[in-house]
Image (cartoon, rainbow, N blue to C red):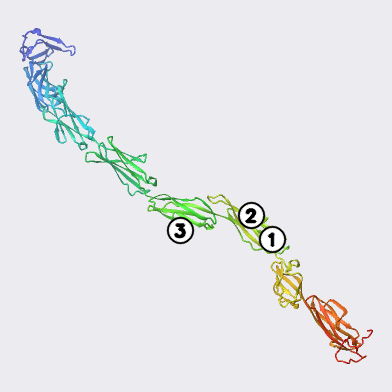
Amino acid sequence: MAYFINEIKNPNVARPERLSVVRNVNTGGYDLQITGLSRAEDVGKYTCIVNTMPPKEYRVNLNLYESPSNISISESYTENGILRIRGTESSSLTLICLSVGGVPPANVTWKRGSQILSSGISQTSYTFAASSNDDLQNYTCVSNSPALTSPMMKDVQIYLKLMPQRPLISSLFVTKENQQLTVSCSSSGSRPAATLSWRFRGSSLPATTTFPPMLDTLTHTYTVSSTLTVTVNRGDNGRNVTCIASNIALSAGTQSKQVVSIHFGPDRIGFDGTTGLQENSAMNLRCTADESNNASIISWRNNSSPLSVNTAVSTSAGIYNGVRTSQTYTKVLSRHDHRSVITCTASNGDNVANNSTTLDVKYSPRVSLSPSNLMVVVGQRDVILQCTLLEANPQQVSYTWNPATSTSNVLKITEITKVHEGQYECEAENTVGRSPIARTQITVQYSPEIESFVPRTPEEVKDSVTVRCNATAKPAVNRMYWRNPNGATASNSNILQINNIRRDQSGVYTCHAENTLTPTGQQPYTGRGQQTLTVDVLYGPSLENTRTNFSSIMHYKESNSSTFPSIMCHSICNPVCHLTWNGPRSSSSAVLNLGLIKRDKNGTYICTARNIVNSSPRSASITIHIIVLYPPNINITISYGINTVNEGERVQIMCTVDSQPYSNVTWHRKGERLGHQDISMAYSQLVISSAHCYDTGNFSCHAENGIGIPATKSTPLKVKSLAFVIVRPGFDSRSPRCIKPKTR
């Protein structure tokens, strides 16, 4: 193996002891090792010759590098053992690094961490806008040379004049109006320490409190802080409070603004949609709270009960940067909502405002009709149905009745009849509508009503009477019975049965029917009805029932001035008999008027009673005798009307006495009573079987009956004597010329 430099074999290698060939166990080759390299001695080409056939040569150029001696960073300084470069935040900063010495010249690089920022031969510069992120950061200048086994490095720390960080305003900038608001502001990260200033309501305000700067020994930065205290009102709500931090690095300063939130509550609440409310329509009642900050929370109550209102809450901006809050309570109204007190409450934690409105819900009427299911009785007076207005809005209503024509809420029935039974309806109407119909039922009860009877005219004994009593009633009849003309019970049912009827059973029979009436509001009582039946038992006249007002024989003294009393004839018969009188006088009626009491009224009078029973003529008669008492009236006659007879002839003198009663008749001759007397005779006869001259004279008939003056009447009798001659004219019974015979 030979060594060549510059392709010239140099068998005289300087200090050959520094060279050695070493087998490389890894590659199997041979390495040339040179120790104590020297640029002057060792730089050149080296050849490796392998003795093969033919031989092989391998050449390598050995160039020896010289390491840089130093790294220099421009404008750097050492403070507290730390190499630093000053700069200003946000200003341009140039870092210059020089590598001193070295062959070949070193490659110089600026690095931050692993990031290569710039590079150059022997020197490099890196210009950048310094930021707070660069502060206290190490930038490394790296010098790389083939002569170095490891790069040569030098760190420099960036030490900036730092702008203050944007101020940090405390979060305690919320307060209530008319109270003090204290705002704290701090700014850190500045170098040198920043100055804090305030602006509010468009003006600069001095800080209320300024605290000494605080050094952060780790970052070498300052934190400054101050407070601003001011009394605020709602007009400050939404205004910015500005804190400004400035130093040499940032003369214009940096600022933070914070909106001041002044809490003030809603003062008032208003309602919309309170008019025109009507049943079954939707109410949109809008509650609007005055401006507040924070926004108000709206809650609702109906009277004392909470309301759940799910509609969205709407807000609008207020003049003080607060919000006006509103919510609409939507509900389909019913009449039950009338006079409901709806309260809307707005609260934001600082104040509570509420307002109430009373709903005026218009709704149609609702009525009730009383009494309900009314029981009344025929004849009941002044029955009143009341249509009561239960509810209505407005309450001005008109009423309609069916049936009937009342226009008020009262229907008055002056007197109940059957036609009043039925259903009654009442309605009320207002401007909203008509009420549901209220109904009630009138049930008309009535006492039993009995069908009238046809009078019955049965014939006595022959006929029987059966009569059924039919009654209608409400409620139904619960008792029926008959009473006879005397008031005694004739039947305990509705049937009257009289067998073989008698005349004394004539009269008015009454059928009675009863039910129980239960009028509303009264104690039950018995309803009674009755109907009469006339039973007229027919019978003809009879002797025992035909009478006059006089006895069968009546005596009256004849008078020229007195009259007979009226003679009445009556007969018990049915139908009524027709009465007539027959006799010396007659009458076509029951009354016989004879006038003056005269003898010509004497006689037998017959009163006849006649009727017709069931088409059969019936009659009965009664006889009376009228005797007119009057004094005797004499009529005397001689037989054959000859007053002169011959002696020896039969003479018959008749005395007819008209008197009542009969008179006692006596005869007289020549003033002497003859022994013959007829008692109670109307006729007396004096018979001279053989007339004698001595019988010549006046014969007198004397009658008396105790009535008035006795009567005497005479008739002459002249008997012609055959034995002597009458000398004087005229007859004289005392004449001695006629001698009475001794015997006759």
The answer to which of marks 1 and 3 sits earlier in the sequence is 3
Whole-percent x and y of residue 263?
24, 35
Whole-percent x and y of residue 28?
17, 12
The image quadrant of residue 307 is top left
Find residue 465 and name its label: 1
| Viewer-closest of 661 and 226 | 661
| Viewer-closest of 48 and 41 | 41
Circle 2: residue type: Met
Location of mark 2 (residue): 480
Circle 3: residue type: Thr
- Mark 1 to mark 3: distance in Å? 51 Å
Whole-percent x and y of residue 448?
59, 56
* Label 2 residue SS: strand
Residue at screen point 19% across, 13% down: 26
Q: Is residue 99 visible?
A: yes
Tally of numbered discs:
3
**Label 2 crowding class (10 Å Cα cut-off): few <14, some 14-19, many 20+?**
many
Q: Is residue 470 left or right of residue 231?
A: right
Answer above or below: position of 67 versus 435.
above
- Mark 2 to mark 1: distance in Å? 18 Å
Find residue 405 and name its label: 3
Circle 1: residue type: Val
Question: Are the two marked residues, 1 and 3, in contact with CB atoms closer than 8 angstroms?
Answer: no
Q: Is residue 145 visible?
A: no
